[in-house]
């Protein structure tokens, strides 16, 4: 049974990160991931050797390679952004541990927002560890007025900020995604940066019912595809560009090629529909 206060989805991602960490050729080092899985009291693998089919397993093989690559890509984004920003905000942070494991500047102010129950679980697991930066857990609903929660905690809209929205937007309604992006733009100072993920065509029944997502249900009891919002999606990249941001959007395959590891680009499934989007809005010059 899952530990109260943490979702099966969050623990599945933690398990995938643990599997990647425990590979000799893994793209990440996230020692906290296995600790989250153990504390969650779930029967999930933390090594590919624990999986009967090994890399042939759709969830822990291909899906795990995707989760490991995504973690590495957004790790790199945050590490690079931290050289020029003074604040970092993780929206829907889940069981992220970047404030504990990445070599971030000591002066960085780090905020992570998520549900009270999930953050409560996370606090318990990390109780004996100190983050590497000034860190705040903030309870917030991303469909509500999370901006007030952030500013009340000391977030400074006038300071350069890195925003990270990893694996969150597909679960929000299109209207909620549009509000979130508008809020990010409103709260951001010059030199702002953002990284986020979208799934093209997620409203299609054929994508949400794909065998890859059926594998998540077989492995964890939760079908991720059924959690995706099925309404019309906004074009958030276009909205950011209209607000003066420079935005790039790339398929997962580009990063598999770059890192020499990740989900096989030749396989056509929902992973081929995923885009990792990065944006920046520099200071205007005369």
Image (cartoon, rainbow, N blue to C red):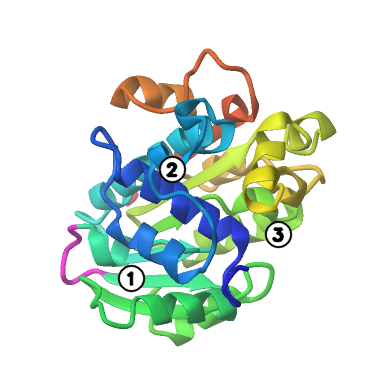
Q: Earlier in the sequence, mark 1 or mark 3?
A: 1
Q: CA distance from mark 1 to mark 3?
A: 23 Å
> Residue 110 shows which numbered tag?
1
Question: Quick check: marks 1 and 3 in contact, CB under 8 Å?
Answer: no
Q: Residue furthest bottom?
A: 152
Q: Residue at x 17, y 58 (%)?
A: 103
Q: Residue furthest top?
A: 266
The kind of secondary structure element at disc 1 is: strand
Q: Nearer the viewer, residue 118 or 111?
A: 118
What segment carries the magenta color? 103-108
Expressed as whole percent of the image width and height from the top left, the position of residue 276 reads 49, 37
Viewer-nearest of labels 1 and 2? 2
Expressed as whole percent of the image width and height from the top left, the position of residue 238 reads 60, 38
Tell me if mark 2 has few (under 14), some (14-19) or many (20+) residues whose alpha carbon lies within 10 angstroms of its own. few
Expressed as whole percent of the image width and height from the top left, the position of residue 138 reads 48, 79
Q: Earlier in the sequence, mark 1 or mark 2?
A: 2
> Residue 50 shows which numbered tag?
2
Q: Residue at x 46, y 49 (%)?
A: 45
Tell me if mark 1 has few (under 14), some (14-19) or many (20+) residues whose alpha carbon lies within 10 angstroms of its own. many
Q: CA distance from mark 3 to mark 2?
A: 39 Å
Viewer-nearest of labels 3 and 2? 2
């Amino acid at each position: 049974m899952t530990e109260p206060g943490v979702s099966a989805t969050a623990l599945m991602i933690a398990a995938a990160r643990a599997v990647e960490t425990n590979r000799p050729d893994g793209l990440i080092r996230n020692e906290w991931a296995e600790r989250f899985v153990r504390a969650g009291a779930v029967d999930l693998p933390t090594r590919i050797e624990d999986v009967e089919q090994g890399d042939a397993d759709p969830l822990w093989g291909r899906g795990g390679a995707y989760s490991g690559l995504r973690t590495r890509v957004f790790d790199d984004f945050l590490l690079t952004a931290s050289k020029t920003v003074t604040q970092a905000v993780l929206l829907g942070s889940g069981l992220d541990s970047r404030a504990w494991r990445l070599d971030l500047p000591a002066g960085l102010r780090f905020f992570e927002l998520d549900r009270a129950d999930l953050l409560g679980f996370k606090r318990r697991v990390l109780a004996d560890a100190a983050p590497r930066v000034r860190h705040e857990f903030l309870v917030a609903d991303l469909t509500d007025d999370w901006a007030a929660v952030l500013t009340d905690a000391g977030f400074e809209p006038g300071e350069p900020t890195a925003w990270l929205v990893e694996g969150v937007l597909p679960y929000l309604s299109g209207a909620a995604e549009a509000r979130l992006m508008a809020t990010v733009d409103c709260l951001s100072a010059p030199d702002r940066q953002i990284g986020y993920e979208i799934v093209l065509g997620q409203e299609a029944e054929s994508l949400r019912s794909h065998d890859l997502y059926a594998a998540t249900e077989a492995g964890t009891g939760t079908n991720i595809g059924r959690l995706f919002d099925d309404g019309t999606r906004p074009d958030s990249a276009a909205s950011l560009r209209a607000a003066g941001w420079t935005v790039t959007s790339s398929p997962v395959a580009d990063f598999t090629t770059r890192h020499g590891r990740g989900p096989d680009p030749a396989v056509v499934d929902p992973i081929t529909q995923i885009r990792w989007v990065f944006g920046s809005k520099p200071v205007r010059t005369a």
